[in-house]
Image (tube, helix red, strand yellow):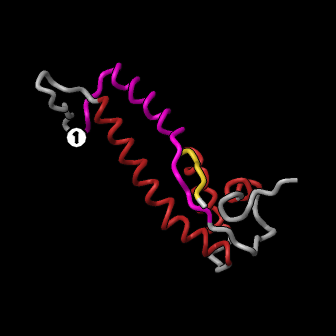
Amino acid sequence: MEISKTYRQVINIEEACLGYIERTDKKETALSLEVARFIRKQINPIKEEFQEELYMNQVKCAYKDNKGVLARDEKGGFQITEEGEAKRIKLNKELMEKEVGIHTRFIDDIPEDLTEDEVEAFEGIFWQVKTN
């Protein structure tokens, strides 16, 4: 099943995933294996797309000379005007709220020692959201 998450949510989920792996000292459990697979198969490609979109926002907002050529500084970075920077910030804020698809990977064995942040990040991805 595919669910939608914003790039902002994906970043938070990735932080929870990496924290969980680190906190559990890389012990192999059903959840840790799914978390590792989730990072490799879903988070990493989403992060690549996100980075590409950030770069394109930078290109869109960079200063261009009268021939439309992007101006670069001595280190190779794009030159940007104050107006361009304001536009880039606005585009990046909008990008953080863009939704992307994530495939759920439900497991049966949910650990009881999850932190509140891990439960919030993982619910709906690794197990069904509990409704009362």
Q: Give the residues drawn in magenta, as a range.
A: 77-104
Q: Which residue is mark 1?
A: 75
Going 56% across and 44% down the picture, which residue do you hit? Answer: 6
The N terminus lies in quadrant: bottom right
Image side of residue 35 versus residue 69, left or right: right
Going 59% across and 47% down the picture, which residue do you hit? Answer: 9
- Label 1: few (<14), some or many (≥20) within 10 Å? few
> Residue 67, how many percent across, how many down?
11, 25
Q: Is residue 91 magenta?
A: yes
Q: Is residue 51 above or below residue 82?
A: below
Going 62% across and 63% down the picture, which residue do you hit? Answer: 104
> Residue 73, how many percent across, how many down?
21, 34
Disc 1 is placed on an element classified as: loop
Image side of residue 68 versus residue 54, left or right: left
Task: Single out the residue that lies furthest toward the bottom.
Answer: 28
> Residue 62, how many percent across, how many down?
27, 30
Q: Is residue 30 above or below residue 85?
A: below
Going 76% across and 57% down the picture, which residue do you hit? Answer: 129
- The amino acid beneath tag 1 is Lys
Image side of residue 97 versus residue 32, left or right: left
